[in-house]
Image (cartoon, rainbow, N blue to C red):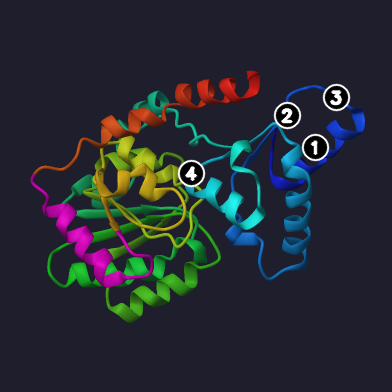
Amino acid sequence: MLTAMNYANIIAIVAKILARSRSRLVVSEHCPPSLWMFGSVRGKIMRYLIKLFYPFADRVVCISNGMASEMNELLNVPRSKLTAIYNPIDIDSLQKQMKSPADHPWLLEHSHPVVLAVGRLSWEKDYPTLLKAFSKLRATRSARLIILGQGEEEKRLNDCAEELGIAGDVSFAGFQENPFSFMASCDLYVMSSAYEGFGNALVEAMACGARVVSTNCPNGPNEILGSGLWGRLAPVGDDDALANAMAATMDDQSPPDVWKRAEEFRSEVAVAAYERVLVQ
């Protein structure tokens, strides 16, 4: 049995104990505990329940090694129970979709280099840092920024772009059914997040052949980019460092072969890993 989300995981573990079942039970975690376990009653309760019940699971799967470390250090889940399996990416489907023309005039005309970001317009994506970094990049060269996604921060981010004087070169293009055509057409993909459980969109951009830059946030980007081997990393919230990383990546005459790295996140790899932990 494989379960996901902490409350469902706990219910499954209790059910196994009550039923005295010998079925193998693997529970999975997709959200870093450091994001939810502090500052709320629900977080305190869940922290207690996880510490109590997770040792009874046969295996606890996390979507990055960083998350597995958090589960051990913050919630005392035994290292022997923890396994990291990266999120699966359907590379073949993605690479078919990326061949469609990107539905945006800046990418169709491509008269200026285009920077792209994709993700919900929410605080954990830290788009204000990206906007400040882009403002500094824009001061030294011609460029445009497209942000795909919707969310509660949209008005604040539009206001921020206005205040920075870059609104004319920033497009909040909303939700797009096919973001992969944007990724394949952009000159640079940037992830500015303060937190990530893994960072699917970063891998997807790499599978589309985009040059990539990311903040070195918990927990996935550093692992995905091999500590900077496959793309530059900047400290979280540091717009100067992010602007410098963006400029250096756009100017790089010998960028890394990001397609090669993206192949390691194929769905088949994750499926095989789940099979191993389920049948041990």
Residue at the bottom extreme of this rendering: 163
**Viewer-side residue, 199 vs 9:** 9
Picture residue at 45% right of the left edge, 53% below the top: 119
Q: Which residue is mark 3?
A: 21
Disc 2: CA contacts within 10 A as few (<14), some (14-19) or many (>=20): many
Q: Pointers 2 and 3 in contact (CB under 8 A)?
A: yes
Disc 2 versus disc 3: distance between alpha carbons? 10 Å
Kindly state the secondary structure of the residue where label 2 is placed.
loop
Residue at the right extreme of this rendering: 18
Which amino acid type corresponds to the residue marked 1 in the rendered image?
Ile
Kindly state the secondary structure of the residue where label 1 is placed.
helix
Kindly state the secondary structure of the residue where label 3 is placed.
loop
Kindly identify which numbered label has been placed on residue 13: 1
Where residue 43 sits in the image (x, y, percent)? Answer: 72, 62
**Viewer-side residue, 189 vs 11:** 11
Which contiguous range is marked in magenta? 234-253
* Of callouts 2 and 4, the N-terminal one: 2
Quarter of the picture containing the C terminus is top right
Q: Pointers 1 and 2 in contact (CB under 8 A)?
A: yes
Disc 3: CA contacts within 10 A as few (<14), some (14-19) or many (>=20): few
Q: Quadrant of residue 172?
A: bottom left
Is residue 220 on the magenta stretch? no
Where residue 144 sits in the image (x, y, percent)? Answer: 24, 60
